[in-house]
Amino acid sequence: MDVITHKCPNCGGALTFDPGDQKFHCPFCLSIFTEDEVTAFEEKQKEAQMADTPVLDPSAATETEPSLQEEVREQADAQAGQMDLFTCPSCGAEIVTDATTAATYCYFCHNPVVLSGRLSGEFLPNKVLPFAIEKEEATKKFLEWAQKKKFVPRDFFDQAQVEKLTGVYFPYWVVDAEMNGSLSGMGTSLRIWRVGDIEYTEHKQYDVLRRGKIKVNELLKHALSKNVQQKMVTGVQPFPLEKAVAFRSQYLAGFQAEKRDIEYIDLSDEVKNELSGYAENLLAGTVNGYTSFKRNNRSINLTKEENNYVLLPVWLVTYRADDENKSAFYYAMNGQTGKVSGVLPISYKRLGIVSGAIFAATTILALIGAYFL
């Protein structure tokens, strides 16, 4: 598996993607490049390497060699999916990751690295939505959000904790679908009025039928099983998917990224049920003017379905409380819109001190009042 660092065309330093201007910056020579410029430079490098690579004589190969080479390649690919130890191309240090990590940092030289083999072939994303919010802005918003709450542990605001804020590209399936639907039922209209002392009731029933074509765009489904904070990440939706671009690994430079481990086929039944329920409710929403409506029959036929594998940006910070259970709290921010989601920890020690102070003050006031009575 290739472990790559996107290099500066001028000095060879490690490039990082800057959400502020959507360009690639070199922290060493301070050069700035567009995605097209970085891609063109890397394509030239590949061409130069291929030109220097000796060509083997095809006549020297035996008939059994292709199948043997293919078998070895398949075994290597299978092992690569489980590997968690890589070599940093900048300093040679070992980089430890789990099976789904696709981009990270070297812990020694802090250069950004991309494990390109985990985002290639069948695992190549169709699109990526680049970060638009820089870490400085994300940190500011995080602190503003946290400081509004009372009884938060003091170490939650420590510099070491704030520095844990990390930009992560999470894998999602994005589904677009079209359906033909029909819904029938019994609509009831009830009218009551009085004339003098007599009350009249009019009860009418109608056969109701609704038909239509329903189109659903950008239904998001998680593609990472270890993403235990799914509800929290869901809380930062929606993402402006119209800003997504064709996938280039350069956009991962300076961030962490995860590859999918949930295939679309494993979600297909869930997606179909969700689409069907949405279509039925949409048709039912067009039934109005009746006192009540009872659904009898419905038919939803999926006529078109398209799914894309997309990486979406999230700023993420984790806090582990100092309690018996070492409870974990997660904070997330949409890397494009700035929408936040999360649950803050509570310092029961601080809560107890404040409660005790209030109780003591109330007791003293009560004693003083009793003394003067």
Image (spheres, rainbow, N blue to C red):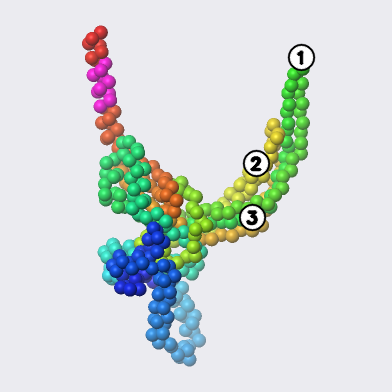
Q: Earlier in the sequence, mark 3 or mark 2?
A: 3
Q: Quadrant of residue 199?
A: top right
Q: CA distance from mark 3 to mark 2?
A: 18 Å
* Overall secondary structure of the magenta section: helix
Q: Is residue 336 above or below residue 105?
A: above
Q: Quadrant of residue 201?
A: top right
In the rendering, which numbered label is found on residue 285? Answer: 2
Q: Is residue 230 above or below residue 34?
A: above
Q: CA distance from mark 1 to mark 3?
A: 55 Å
Q: Which residue was labeled with disc 1? A: 196
Please report the residue visible at 29 percent of the width from the left and 49 percent of the height from the top. 161
Q: Are marks 1 and 3 in contact (CB under 8 Å)?
A: no
- Comparing 171 with 63, the one in front is 171
Q: Which residue was labeled with disc 3? A: 178
Q: Residues within 10 Å of mark 1 (few under 14, many from 20)?
A: few
- Comparing 321 with 105, the one in front is 105
